[in-house]
Image (cartoon, rainbow, N blue to C red):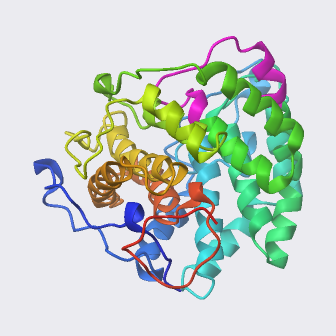
Amino acid sequence: MVLAVSAPLGMAATAAPSPAASAAPAAPTVFDATAAARFASLALDCVGREYPSKISHVLSGEQDVRPPHLLTPAFYGCYDWHSAVHGHWLLARLARTFPAAPFAAPARAALARSLTTVNIAGEVAYLLGKGRSTFERPYGLAWVLQLAAELRDWDDPDARVWAGALSPLEAEAALRFEQWLPKLTRPIRIGEHDQTAFAFALVLDWADTAGQARTRDVVAARARDYYLGDHDCPLSYEPSGQDFLSPCLAEADLMRRLLPPARFAYWLSAFLPQVPRTATAAWLAPAVVTDPTDPKLAHLDGLNLSRAWMLDGIAFGLPPRDARVPALTAASRAHREAGLKAVTGEHYEGGHWLGTFAVYLSTARGLRLPPVTTTTLDRTPRRP
């Protein structure tokens, strides 16, 4: 299978690569099983790798001094809990998209080892432990729901078993959003894990897949409360030095999920008035990582990837003839090229998580398009 992508999803660059990225191999022009294998190998290498491990762990006594695989028996690899969760999402996404690829069998085996009723019961017990009410909120919990959505969407008998096993953790993650958001009086507008806009987007996509109207209503209402009146987002202040999410673009990518195209176009004019109405990428330059071995500085590689999919999403949410689509498309291509070059796996600081961002972008997961089997690089995405 060759995955179909569209003009804003195309992998050809429209801007010269940065000096820091110029020595890296060129990004592929087609996302097929061969290209996907590179990203699958990163997740297969880390979902069962316990160390190094960075845990966010509240100890209530000596009984809590335990190794990661005993604390969280399903998601103990990939350096940290949320990366282990979305590493499993990557494997499910690619095995579903390329079922005949050589990596599909080991990906399925890894999912089968992790997503058991016993392991997930251990995960839920950990979350319910004393002092863990804020554990991985909102980022890791949102990725749990995205993993659940992928398994629900996958018409496969094993995937249905894994989805059933995951369901208690899925329910707990959703409940935590429902309980937290009425108490959260302000959005969280940073460019790292605590950001609300990106997490909300993942939760809304899950809620639509799972038919969970209650969670969707809570998140959608809060999104409107927080963001509908926003204007003049200071995109020129971005990025901060260790961002992997754009506060401005993530908010716009969220709001296109809640507003019809004409209304979204009107809102975007006030929120991001700086988006050009000509086909240029110069208005938003990709970030440059000066030291890929520094786990915080390497966040900027992820920023380039997430910016690319957010720009795609914003373009997708506008009316087809909107004059800003060419500029959004051009900027997405430049960020895609810069971001994909950096996903090499050479350094574990980035290799344990960047593959997920590359797959989320390359498979257009955020657009939730119907499955396709041919490649097109010269079309603007259209709503199904």
Is 91 colored magenta in this rendering?
A: no
Give x and y (percent) for residue 368. Answer: 63, 61
Give the total number of marks visible in the rendering: 0
Q: Quadrant of residue 376?
A: bottom left
Q: Is residue 317 above or below residue 346?
A: above
Q: Is residue 9 visible?
A: yes
Near-viewer residue (185 or 145): 185
Q: Is residue 328 above or below residue 64?
A: below
Q: Is residue 125 above or below residue 241?
A: below
Which residue is painted at 71% across and 61% down in the image? 150
Give x and y (percent) for residue 168. Answer: 89, 47
Q: Is residue 191 visible?
A: no
Which residue is painted at 71% across and 66% down in the image? 111
Drawn side of residue 34 relative to residue 127, left or right: left
Read off the magenta span.
Answer: 176-198
Q: Indicate the quadrant containing the C terminus: top left, top right, bottom left or bottom right.
A: bottom right
Is 187 colored magenta in this rendering?
A: yes
